[in-house]
Image (tube, rainbow, N blue to C red):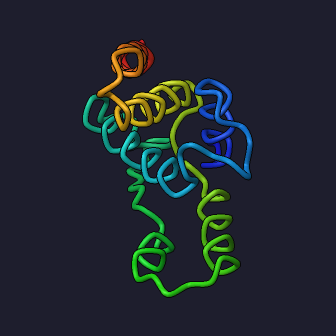
Amino acid sequence: MFKVRDIERSVRQIIRDEEPTNYRWSREEVYRFVFDGICELNAIRPETRYVNRVLVTIDKPQQFSQLEQGGLSVQQQDALLDAIASFDILIAHKYKDAIVHFVCYRCFMIDSNDMQNMQLSQGHFTLFKEFANG
């Protein structure tokens, strides 16, 4: 088990987006990509939905819908994002790197019109599949 913030920390180191006052990819984007990665991992490896032989569903935290409603102060947004960051991901630790590379893939896909970012994106998607199947 690990937290969303653990994934974010690893991703930001890999994509070199570590300056909080000047993030290229917002916290909300990265957190959404984490949950997209979990869904993708569950599709590739259905057994990742089980913890100690118990089916676990990992839904996006309710804080995402509150963020989508808008009209929040910066402090309220930060509080919601902090709550998402502390969310426990109930997946075996050996799949953490798969999710990290999925998030990197999605970040670079945003700028995939740049050839280098497209190649980086494809490389991270390949790593995601390798870690998911490894």
Q: Quadrant of the N terminus?
A: top right
Q: Which residue is located at x 47 percent, y 80 percent?
A: 66
Q: Identify which residue, 61 or 104, lies in the foreground.
A: 104
Which residue sits furthest left? 43
Report the side of 122 relative to 79 (left or right): left
Q: Position of residue 101 (x, y in %)?
A: 48, 26
Q: Identify which residue, 88 or 64, lies in the foreground.
A: 64
Q: Quadrant of the C terminus?
A: top left
Report the side of 88 relative to 34 (left or right): right
Q: Position of residue 17 (x, y in %)?
A: 64, 35
Which residue sits furthest bottom? 71
Q: Quadrant of residue 76?
A: bottom right
Please determine whether, in this image, residue 76 is positioned above or below residue 22. below
Q: Which residue is located at x 67 percent, y 70 percent?
A: 78
Q: Position of residue 106 (x, y in %)?
A: 39, 35
Please determine whether, in this image, residue 116 is positioned above or below residue 4. above
